[in-house]
Amino acid sequence: MNSSTAPFEWLLDSLELDASLFHVGRYCGSWQASTHGLARASFHLLVQGECWLHLHEREQSIALYSGDAVFLLRDLPYRLSDAASPEQAQCNPRIAMQTLDRHARDGVSLVCGFFHFRPGLSSLIIDALPDHLILRAGDPGSSAARRLFELIMEECSRSEGPAGALLERLSHLLFLYVLREQSQAVADLGGLLGLARHPQFAALLERLIAEPQQAWPLEQMAELTGLSRSAFCKRFQELAGTSPGHVLLSLRMRQACRLLQQGQPVAEAADACGYQSVAAFTRAFSKVVGVLPGAYRRQFA
């Protein structure tokens, strides 16, 4: 990494998520839909028609049009509905989706699904972002995202129906492009992405990413920012929303995942991430990733 944007780009590239579809179809007449309460992030791609997104119950209502996409990064109270009024949307029935009809001129066609963000570094990155992102069909500067959305719309218009696996992959890629474009445009990002932009902390983050095998005592981290240990810990917590130790652990486990995916033995991965003991590395990896490193490695064999 050799520029001030490198840690920021590295973090975005390190985001790990899975996309899965749960609805592809049409709503007609009066309707409402929501996945609130399932404790999952979700996405909703409007491939035909118009509807309303009501966020946080009655606090915000947003008109959506064909070609728009909504990414809800947390389990928000929300409703999608044909009704402009949140009160009316709440009273509308929850009805089953009809199958997609590429010749239909009425109703609303949607591709909806869930995102699962991997624990550790990916969760820290998402915590830094707004609770929702919206891609508008007419947004300037979103050419790559728009081309992906056009592919999604073309897939939905196939006479034999869309392929679910392909829609999941396209939705995954669409989100990554929207995330990169919109997060770069937000001036006051917090969390880990905000830390990567901060001139006093970007160099430190770059070093942590490049050298996760180093011991990195707090005094050394503080020295790289020109702050005392106490001032460093306080400012780091304010900017990142978590401790330096937690960030270092997440960066090390992300590196460990990459090495294990490449087939490196567990002991070598542990050493490359600054662990003198395989047992200590195994405990840390299992706590963050949720699976033993050996089992994780075998998934990619």
Image: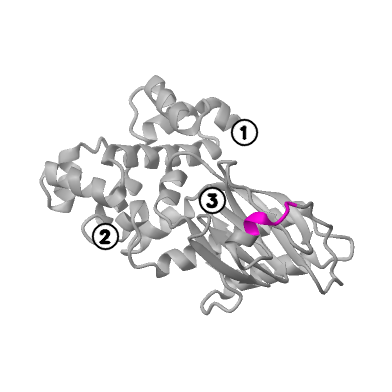
Rendered image quadrant of residue 252:
top left
Q: Which callout, 3 or 1, points to the residue nearer the camera?
A: 3
The disc at residue 198 is 2
Which residue is rendered at x = 38% and y = 42% of the image? 251
Is there CB contact under 8 Å for labels 2 and 1?
no
Span shown in magenta: 89-94
153 magenta-colored: no
Circle 1: residue type:
Gln
**Disc 3/disc 1 C-alpha distance (Å):** 36 Å
Which mark is first along the chain, 2 or 3?
A: 3
Q: Residue furthest left?
A: 228
Task: Inspect the image, locate mark 3, and give the three-letter code of the amino acid beneath it.
Answer: Pro
Label 1: which secondary element: loop
Q: In the rendering, at what x and y percent does residue 192 appear? A: 35, 51
Relative placement, left or right, of 220 versus 185 is: left
- The crowd level at tag 1 (other Cα within 10 Å; few <14, some 14-19, many 20+) is few
Image-quadrant location for residue 148: bottom right
* Res 295 quadrant in image: top right
Q: Residue at x 49, y 33 (%)?
A: 289
Amino acid on which the number 2 mark rests in the picture: His
Tell me the element at label 2.
loop
User: Within the magenta stretch, is there residue 91?
Assistant: yes
Dot 2 or dot 1: first in sequence order is: 2
Name the quadrant of the C terminus. Answer: top right
Residue at mark 3: 77
Q: Name the residue beneath numbered marker 1.
A: 299
The residue shown at (66%, 51%) is 113
Q: Nearer the viewer, mark 2 or mark 1?
A: 2
Q: Give the distance between the C-alpha atoms of the residues marked 3 and 2, in whole angstroms.
A: 32 Å
